[in-house]
Amino acid sequence: MRRLLLLNLSMLVAICIIIGVYLMVNHDKQPRLEGASGSGGKEPTNQNAETLGYENADGNGSGENGRSGSADPDEAADGAGSDNSVSSGDSAVGSDAAAGSSGGTESAGSVTTPSGAVEEPPADPPGGKPAGSSTGNGSPGQSDEGSSAGSGSSGPSGTDSSMGGGSSGPSGTDSSTGSGSQNPSGTGSSTGSDAPDQSGGGSADDGRTITLGFVGDILLAGSVDKLMQSSGYDYPYAKSLSFLTEPELMAGNLETPITTRGVPAEDKQYVFKGSPKSLPALKEAGFDLVNLANNHTLDQGKEGLLDTIGHLEEAGMPNIGAGNNETEAYAPVYLEAGGISVAYIGLTRVVPEASWKATSDHAGLAETYDSTRGVKAIQEAKKHADLVVVMVHWGIERSDNPNADQKLLAHTYIDAGADLVIGSHPHVLQGFETYKGKWISYSLGNYIFNMTATDKTKDTGVLNAFCTGSGDCTLKFNPMRGVASQPTPLEGEEAQALLKRLSGISLNASINSEGYVSAK
């Protein structure tokens, strides 16, 4: 009897082992990233196209590399209002367009995990990308793989941010040099090493103030490239140059891979490629940093991505939001001006296909469908910098208002310690919001871009943030309009009309006649 019992127990143990091995094998076969349809891999081809209808220099709506756009720039393949993206295997914040829909509108605010997706544990906090460090050998395409929520802000003294009142800049801020942005010594391309040796974020509140500048999408390809070739690579910045050189630190979203090589992305209606010749003018115009976390950086594949990082390094231009792996992609860049340190983090919630996401052993972008890794990067950066800025690509194209996912993510970033959240991707201006004393700019629209048939995509501007070392910031928006891909400052009634429109779509905030943004 005892022998029979032992035999039965042995058989039961063997069956359990077989079942366990079977489950482990099948678990490893599950896709790590899936689209909104839950099918894995690339998104459905009818949801891949950009919806803006970019025009080339001849205005015929054709995209780059021979891919033609819709005959009517406002009627691209996706239809207006889609967030053309693939959710990750992590729990997604919100949800994308319903599977199989041709127009594709985002649902609001639900937290979903795609069917069959496998959740990944959050990555270890990145070490950061302090100024002056580099990854690999620095040559294009040859990088080696591997390697507070605040309380209510009153703004700097001397700033009148009330509606209708004229205002001068914050006291203590000297922004009249016009001689180019003041890069901290040693500032250069920075892709992945230890964070600055600084115990804890936040300097003594001694009244020091710096000016940070931001713009929206920068496209250095297509008809813009043709204009630069004929009129000079400094052409796009000519009329707004004084606004770009005024801030101590200037940043924007670079919506172009910079490479002479690469393989154009398939099943993607608009595919861009910019020349390395365009970068010196970008640097000389006053830009200190660019975000690469967007839906065009890998238009020329991994080769194009690594070339872009390499060419930016050669130009002395730090970059965020992409890298040889997820550690690099999520790592902050630390810059310093006026004795105040600033950490910049780049994230995207618009990923054309799963393979564009950076992983532990795969080059790509820092995605934020799940906020976990972005939050960890913010929390880590807060330990080493006075200010934390999150630049994020998100939202619905040509929509004046942020969707629920944008609001939820922005609030989550601020709860984690971000002082400013600066958005891009909708190609139009969206409003501002104050949350727990911190500021959110949901979209700064197109700054330098191909001209389109949608009039409001031409509305743009330069955003100034006057910030103290303790994280209190006052915002001022300088209204402009794109004319032949050249941002041009607005004056008089045109300026007031744009400021009034932007004030009307802001949340818990208003904008006065001077462009200063204040909490309601």
Image (cartoon, rainbow, N blue to C red):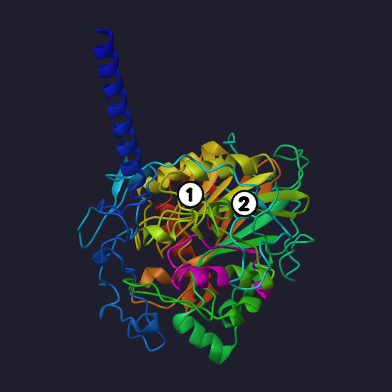
Q: Is residue 267 above or below residue 203?
A: below
Residue 154 colored in magenta in the image: no
- Find residue 332 and name its label: 2
Tag 1: Cα neighbours inside 10 Å, few (<14), some, or many (≥20)? many
Q: Position of residue 297 (x, y in %)?
A: 48, 67
Amino acid beneath label 1:
Ser
Residue at image mark 1: 510
Marks 1,2: beta carbons within 8 A: no
For marks 1 and 2, give the CA distance. Answer: 31 Å
The mark closer to the camera, 1 or 2, is: 2
How many numbered discs, if any?
2
Identify the residue shown where x is 43% and y is 78%.
Answer: 450
In the figure, is residue 487 to the left or right of 246? left
Tag 2: Cα neighbours inside 10 Å, few (<14), some, or many (≥20)? many
Q: Is residue 182 above or below residue 130?
A: below
Give the quadrant of residue 199.
Answer: top right
Q: Is residue 362 visible?
A: yes
Write the start and end of the magenta stretch as one range. Answer: 283-307
Q: Position of residue 169 (x, y in %)?
A: 67, 55
Residue 293 colored in magenta in the image: yes
Q: For mark 1, give the secondary structure.
A: strand
Amino acid beneath label 2:
Pro
Q: Is residue 169 visible?
A: no
Q: Position of residue 299 (x, y in %)?
A: 43, 71
Give the quadrant of residue 155.
Answer: top right
Identify the residue shown where x is 68% and y is 75%.
Answer: 284
Q: For mark 2, give the secondary structure.
A: loop
